[in-house]
Amino acid sequence: MSTTRPDLDDAGNARLDTRLAALPDTPIDPRFSAEVLRQAREVLAEEREGSAFARASRLWYGTLLPAALVACALVYACDAVRTLERIYVASAP
Amino acid sequence: MHTDDEALVEGLRRNEPAAFDAAYTRHGPHLYRFLHRLTGRRDLAEDLFQETWIAVARNAARLEPNTDLTAWLFTIARNRYRSYRRWAVLDLTRLAALGDEPREPPAPGPAERAEARQKAEALERAIAKLSVAHREVLLLAGVEGLEPAQIAEVLGQKPEAVRQRLHRARAELAAILEKEDAVTSPRRDAKGESR
């Protein structure tokens, strides 16, 4: 069935909006609302713990581990130079 | 955006429980009202409401600092409903329910506001007859009072497209209300009763 739609002016729109804004509230069941909040808080806590672990992982893999590897490489390089020096001195005529 | 919402966004980004509780208290009733009128079913509105806040809890830390909290929350709620409708196509029992979503009567008001209640009931019936696209834009603009920029963000459209959709939605609503008035008025005259 076709419907002839009225062409609303600003006043018509305003009247409609006023009626829409005056619609009665649709109350939410308080027990249901409390249960949803409880479940959402649990998820929030899981996310918080998960993000702390993620931060610790980033710190280990992003900073501490590379620093440890670089330090080991430097120690190895210094030791290698000293070893070569000893060999050179020992084999000198 | 409301400065309080800005503070809530900062708190949510840090996963603060107090900020989450405040956001739930402030925006929860509006989201539930929107979902209830959008779906027309209390049970479905409750399911979608629960899914919405679980999604909020999962994604709060990923919020951008300048996020419009109201628009973001309504976007999640609306997307949950769209997802439900998409999956309902694959579920025959849900598909049957989609086309015949029962409309619950509005909450009763005091006796002295009987006429206002009748008008509200007529408006509720008219809203229920709208297409989903028109219903959601009218609920966001007329009932929830979102700004046009916020509605554009929720619907994922340009502001001009939202204005056009809102204009068409209002026109359709007005046409339905006119038809309702035309149907109910002669009945009163025939019975000779005054209301």
Image (cartoon, coloured by chain):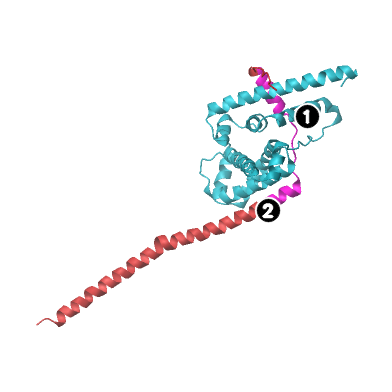
Q: Mark 1: few, some, or many residues within 10 Å (few <14, many ≥20)? A: some
Which residue was labeled with disc 2? A38
**Discs 1 and 2 share one subunit:** no
Query: Was residue B86 drawn as part of the magenta stretch in this picture?
Result: no
Q: Which residue is painted at 74% across and 30% down in the image?
A: B124
Q: Which residue is painted at 48% across and 58% down in the image?
A: A55
Query: Which amino acid type is shown beneath numbered disc 2?
Result: Arg
Q: Which chain is red?
A: A
Q: Give SS at disc 2.
A: helix
Counting from the top left corner in percent of width and height, residue B64 is at 51, 44
Q: Total label count? A: 2
- Tell me: B75 left or right of B93: left
Chain letter of mark 2 equals A
Counting from the top left corner in percent of width and height, residue B145 is at 64, 31
**Quadrant location of the C terminus of chain B in the rendered image:** top right
**Quadrant location of the N terminus of chain B in the rendered image:** top right
- Which residues fall within the magenta stretch? A11-38
When the figure is inspected, residue A64 is found, relative to residue B189, above or below; the finding is below
When the figure is inspected, residue A82 is found, relative to residue B93, above or below; the finding is below
Q: CA distance from mark 1 to mark 2?
A: 34 Å
Which tint was used for chain B?
cyan
Chain letter of mark 1 equals B
Residue B131 seen by the camera: yes
Which residue was labeled with disc 1? B121
Residue A21 seen by the camera: no
